[in-house]
Amino acid sequence: MKIALGCDHGGIVLKESVVKAIKDSGCEYIDCGTMTSESVDYPDFATKVATKIQDGNADKGVLMCGTGIGISIAANKYKGIRCAHVTDVFQAEMSAEHNNANIIAIGGRVSSPEEAYLFVKKFLSTEFAGGRHQSRIDKITDIESSQFK
C-alpha cells in the first residue's frame, strides 16, 4: 500500500512519527511536503495528497496541520475523498472501518507525536467493514456526484 503524506508548518511536528508509523505498517509513502517549519498554506498540501489518491498514485493519505480541521476541510473538497479528522485511536479505527476514509487528518497542536503514531497505525491496519456501511458510503457518493461537476 502506498500512502501520500502532507502537512503544513503546524503539522510538521508529527511528520517523523507518522512516517515511522507508515513504515512500521509495511507501507511505502510519498512525501508531498512541507519540509520545514516555515509558514505555508495547508490547502496546498491537501491538494497534493488528494490528487495523488484521485490519480491512483496513492491508496490512502495522512494530512497534518495545526488542528487537523482546516486541512481536512480542504481535502474533502475533492471528489472521491473521504478525509476524517481524528483525535483518538477509536476515531482512526472507525474512520476506516465504518466510513471507508481514504485520508485521516491530525493536528500537530492537539495531538502528540506518540498519539499520531498510534492513530496512523490503527487507520492503516483497519479494513472497511462494508455491509450496512457501504450503503451509507454510496449515499455520500451520490451527494458528492450531485454537487461536483
Image (cartoon, rainbow, N blue to C red):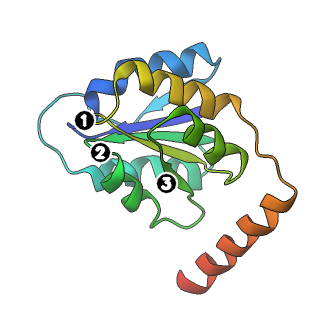
Whether residue 24 is visible to the viewer of this picture, yes or no, is: yes
Q: Secondary structure at mark 2?
A: loop
Identify residue for label 3.
51
Q: Amino acid at mark 1?
A: Arg
Identify residue for label 1.
109
Above or below: residue 124 compared with residue 135: above
N-term-proximal mark, 1 vs 2: 2
Residue drawn at the location 62% of the way across and 23% of the way down: 27
Q: CA distance from mark 1 to mark 2?
A: 6 Å
Report the residue that reaches farthest toward the left.
38
- Position of residue 144 measured from the top left corner of the image (x, y, whole percent): 59, 76
- Position of residue 2 measured from the top left corner of the image (x, y, whole percent): 61, 32
- Do the CB atoms of the residues marked 1 and 2 lie less than 8 Å apart? yes
Give the number of callouts.
3
> Within 10 Å of the Cα at label 2, are there few (<14), some (14-19), or many (20+) other Cα atoms?
many
Q: Amino acid at mark 3?
A: Thr
Identify residue for label 2.
67
Residue drawn at the location 55% of the way across and 67% of the way down: 79
Q: CA distance from mark 1 to mark 3?
A: 26 Å
- Position of residue 124 measured from the top left corner of the image (x, y, whole percent): 64, 31
Q: Secondary structure at mark 1?
A: loop
Is 90 on the left or on the right of 66, as rendered?
Answer: right
| Foreground: disc 3 or disc 2 | 2
Q: CA distance from mark 3 to mark 2?
A: 22 Å
Q: Quadrant of residue 10?
A: top left
Q: Amino acid at mark 2?
A: Thr
Q: Quadrant of residue 63?
A: top left
- In the image, 17 versus 59, the foreground residue is 17
- In the image, 48 versus 87, the foreground residue is 87
